[in-house]
Image: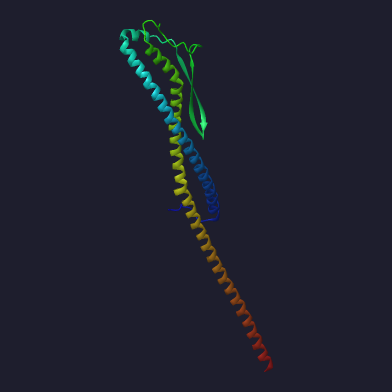
Amino acid sequence: MARLNVNPTRMVLTTLKKRLKVAVKGHKMLKDKRDELMKQFLELARENKSLREQVEAHIGNIYSNFVIASAVMSTEVLNEALMFPKQGVSIEVGNKNVMSVDVPVFDFKTTTDDTSNIYPYGFANTSAELDNAIENLSNIFPELLKLAAVEKEVQLLAAEIEKTRRRVNALEYVMIPQFQETIKYIQMKLDENERGNQTRLMKVKDMMIQEVIEEKQASTNAALDEYSTYNK
């Protein structure tokens, strides 16, 4: 792993140690977030699968009733019966926060207070299968909204998981190793400089000791010469 291009100083070393500490802490938090997102994603995926199977089964029954109604009713009568819907809905879109991800929440309101008032035709010229299809379609509408919200939440969580995974990998395999390698390099450089300074200090000390020894020896020799001259 390539180290960072920085000056090997104690100030830089201190800064990098702080950044490494923050990176390690952030890495742990992101891993915890990723694991929790994965847990919620799997739960939602199972819920989405079950809900989709239920909705598809109901829609299959609705299509079957429509097909039978189309077979027993003329096209003109069927089109006329469904031309002007009697009930309408307005969709309300909210959101909730799941692990820092804003996911949609859908709700709806009917245009009339009587939610059972859904048949836009009289019952004289229509078949029971058409009544069943419209009733089932009205009953399944909340499940359709819930399925749409769950599927969108699954998509958003999957995108957030991928984003978090990339960040975790960047910290784990790039940033943290770079910080560690750079800190090791700076520490080695500082230790090397410290050893060099100690070596130079020891040399200076030896030179100073040698000078003192030479001065004392010269002083001693001078005293001996003076003593010898005096005795003569």
In the rendered view, how is the structure colored? rainbow
Q: The C terminus is located in which quarter? A: bottom right
Give the quadrant of residue 154.
top left
The residue nearer to you, when weighing 55 against 210, is 55
Q: Is residue 175 left or right of residue 212?
A: left
Give x and y (percent) for residue 85.
41, 10
- Residue 77 coordinates in the image, percent (x, y): 33, 7
Residue 214: x and y in percent read 60, 80
Question: Closest to the observer: 230 or 159?
Answer: 159
Q: Is residue 117 above or below residue 33?
A: above
Relative to 33, residue 145 above or below = above
User: Position of 213 compared to 118: left or right?
Assistant: right
User: Residue farthest to the bottom?
Assistant: 232
The image quadrant of residue 197 is bottom right
Provide residue 221's location: percent of width, then percent of height.
63, 85
Quick check: can you spot residue 154? Answer: yes
Residue at 53% from the left image edge and 65% from the top image edge? 195
Q: How many numbered marks have been drawn onto this rendered protein structure?
A: 0
Question: For the point 40% across and 27% down, which residue is it?
Answer: 53
Compared to residue 184, the image places residue 169 above or below, namely: above
Q: Residue at x 49, y 30 (%)?
A: 102
* Lateral position of residue 76 relative to residue 43, left or right: left
Q: Which residue sits at x=48%, y=35%?
A: 40
Q: Is residue 149 above or below residue 202?
A: above
Could you say which is closer to the camera, residue 189 or residue 33? 33
| Residue 151 seen in the current view | no
